[in-house]
Image (spheres, helix red, strand yellow):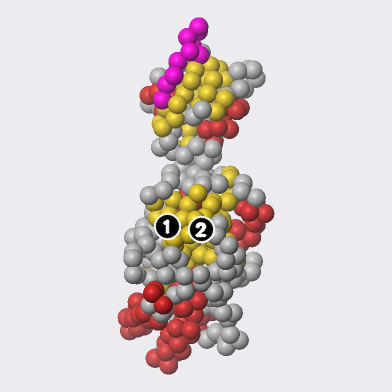
Amino acid sequence: MRADNASSVAGRAAPVSTAPVALRVPIRPRSAATVTVLLGVAVGLAAFAPPASAQPAVPMPAVPMSAAPVPAVFAGGVPSGVGELKAMQAHLRKLSDRLLSATVGVRVGQAYGSGVIVEPSGLVLTAAHVAQRASTDCEVILLDGTRIPARALGLNRNLDAAVIRIMKPGTYPMVEMAPKDSIKAGQWCVATGHPGGVEKGRKPVLRLGRILETSDSVLVSDCTLVGGDSGGPLFDASGRVIGIHSRIGGMLTANLHVPIDGFHRSWERLNASEEWGHLPGQAPFIGVRGAAEDTVARITEVFPETPAERAGLKPGDIVLKLGGEAVTNFASLTELIGKTNPGENLALVVRRGEERLELRIVIGKR
């Protein structure tokens, strides 16, 4: 048995890894003229929001979506001409104020990411690698630059999903979460966030794209993401949240998002401040084997070129504490390692024969 349990992405708010994605959905390519016009739509939309200084210090609730129909092209078609492009632009212009007002910056320590408010009381969806740890104090930055104390609730690291609660009572601008099973490959989508981190005087940046691929664990879109966008929202054409930005794919135009269905499935656990799972390639480990049936955390094997070997652990050592937490047996050591982050430098107390030794160990990842 190896003490190599699950944990989180190392605490960085930038997208944390790259992964090639096979795009199997047959989506008709856009013409050069269409691409040019759509880029102009995406770049220009941020200007439709009122100046940051015009936003109230205590935001008012978001205005509900009007009953105006969504242009049919948003369901997955390619614009047939200038008229349809103008209809898309007019529709997105109506949405932009709501979407940008509900998009927030998230600061945890010195790291920045993004998020989106989905309840007027201040419940924020973000990425697990942005929130870092359950019950961690953090800060939410509103559109007008106001910084408000907040706290991370639960984290589902298997999906890279997290929920944050704004601690200051108030009524905040919000957007709705899309219902389950409402996302289709080929549909148009809108991404917002704070690329490069929150910048004074700059509103969240809005980008237009399409869903390329869907699954239970990930959405792939061609909305360009960079560091700082992590945790920000992906919207459908009705202005509902359909995903949360997670990481960059193998290509700049193939980026990965947590599907909103994953939040629906994990909702009770996330709001109960539970923390579980890990992203592929980010599981913490130290590189030892132990006797599961033993009444103490006795190390039976130390693997070469691992954090355990570098820390000075040896077969026969009995681990007493890790990071200040008592270790009672090998199962409890495995559980404690699973709650750490790769890169953490922790105190390790062991008994070697009659000696009590204090070591330091840097948690690895695999």
**128 in relation to 285, above or below:** below
**Label pair 1/2, CB-CB below 8 angstroms:** yes
Query: Measuring 61% from the left and 22% from the top, which residue is drawn there?
Result: 328
- Left of 33 or right of it: where is 92? right
Name the quadrant containing residue 255. bottom left
Q: Magenta stretch containing residue 238, yes or no?
A: no
Residue 213 seen in the figure: no
**9 in relation to 253, above or below:** above
Query: Circle 1 — which element?
Result: strand
Where are the magenta residues, as a range? 351-360
Query: Hey, which residue is sitting farthest right in the picture?
Result: 268
Question: At which x and y percent is residue 168?
Answer: 55, 60
- Left of 154 or right of it: where is 344? left
Q: Taken as a whole, is the magenta stretch helix, strand or loop?
A: strand
Question: At which x and y percent is residue 184?
Answer: 56, 71
Query: Measuring 57% from the left and 66% from the top, which residue is drawn there?
Result: 170
For label 2, the residue is: 126
Q: Amino acid at mark 1?
A: Gly
At label 1, counting other C-alpha atoms closer than 10 Å, the crowd grade (few under 14, some 14-19, many 20 or more) is many
Q: Amino acid at mark 2?
A: Thr
Question: At which x and y percent is residue 268?
Answer: 67, 54
Query: Measuring 48% from the left and 59% from the top, which residue is drawn there?
Result: 148
Res 113 label? 1
